[in-house]
């Protein structure tokens, strides 16, 4: 069936705080990169959440984790998401759903984005089951407790966590 839509849907945006990058984030990016020609990972610059890592650290973690995927770019993002999506010529927002508890918030955000920009679609992806319980906030708690992090974050992120641990000693 030919695509008569005047918009190109080959670019998607995956926004998030990524504080820190988790194996679940990596999994979603790798799978979304197979669906879209271009995927921009938009790292939120200013969040309502108190972040543990700086914007630069979060961007570096993501870039180092994804450096082997040629169609993924990591960029900082600030402001209204739909405006950012439009500024990149994209029309799809990728969001992850780990558990049913994520659904209500993500559904509300998707509907808000649709009200603001009806031409933008939200695509929900679920991480692989072994990552479905991992969240950045859980990772931060485990990290602060001094536990082993290899089961929660990609290899490049371990260096940032170790540096953070040494800094807090």
Image (spheres, helix red, strand yellow):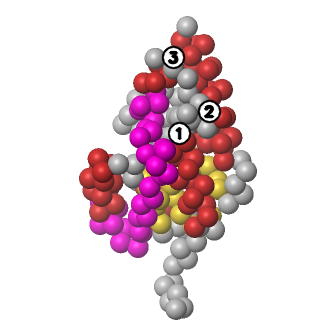
Q: Secondary structure at mark 3?
A: loop
Residue with the mark numbered 1: 22
**Quadrant of image for the C terminus:** top right
The quarter holding residue 115 reads bottom left
Q: Which comes sooner in the sequence, label 3 or label 2? A: 3
Q: Is residue 37 magenta?
A: no
Residue 57: give x, y in percent of width and height.
60, 32
Q: Which mark is residue 146?
A: 3
Mark in the foreground, 3 or 2: 3
Q: Residue at x 73, y 51 (%)?
A: 68
Q: Secondary structure at mark 1?
A: loop
Q: Which mark is residue 157?
A: 2
Asked if labels 2 and 1 touch by Cβ distance under 8 angstroms, the answer is yes
Q: Which mark is residue 128?
A: none
Q: Is residue 116 magenta?
A: yes
Residue 156: give x, y in percent of width and height.
67, 34
Q: Can you say whether 117 is above or below 165 in the image?
A: below
Q: Which residues are magenta?
A: 112-140
Residue 74: give x, y in percent of width and height.
62, 49
Which residue occupies the foreground of this view, 23 or 88? 23
In space, the residues marked 3 and 2 are separated at their CA atoms by 15 Å
In space, the residues marked 1 and 2 are separated at their CA atoms by 8 Å
Which residue occupies the foreground of this view, 103 or 167? 103
Q: Which comes sooner in the sequence, label 1 or label 2? A: 1
């Amino acid at each position: 069936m030919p695509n008569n839509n005047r918009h190109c849907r080959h670019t998607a945006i995956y926004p998030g705080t990524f504080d820190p990058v988790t194996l679940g984030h990596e999994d979603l990016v790798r799978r979304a990169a197979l669906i879209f020609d271009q995927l921009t990972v938009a790292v939120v610059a200013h969040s309502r959440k108190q972040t543990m890592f700086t914007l630069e650290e979060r961007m570096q973690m993501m870039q180092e984790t994804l450096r082997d995927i040629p169609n993924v770019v990591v960029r900082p993002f600030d402001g209204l998401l739909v405006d950012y999506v439009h500024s990149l010529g994209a029309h799809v927002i990728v969001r992850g759903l780990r558990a049913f508890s994520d659904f209500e918030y993500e559904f509300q955000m998707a509907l808000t984005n649709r009200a603001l920009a009806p031409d933008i679609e939200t695509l929900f992806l679920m991480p692989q089951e072994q990552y479905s319980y991992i969240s950045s906030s859980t990772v931060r708690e485990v990290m602060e407790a001094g536990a082993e992090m290899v089961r929660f974050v990609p290899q490049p992120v371990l260096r940032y966590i170790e540096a953070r641990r040494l800094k807090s000693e």
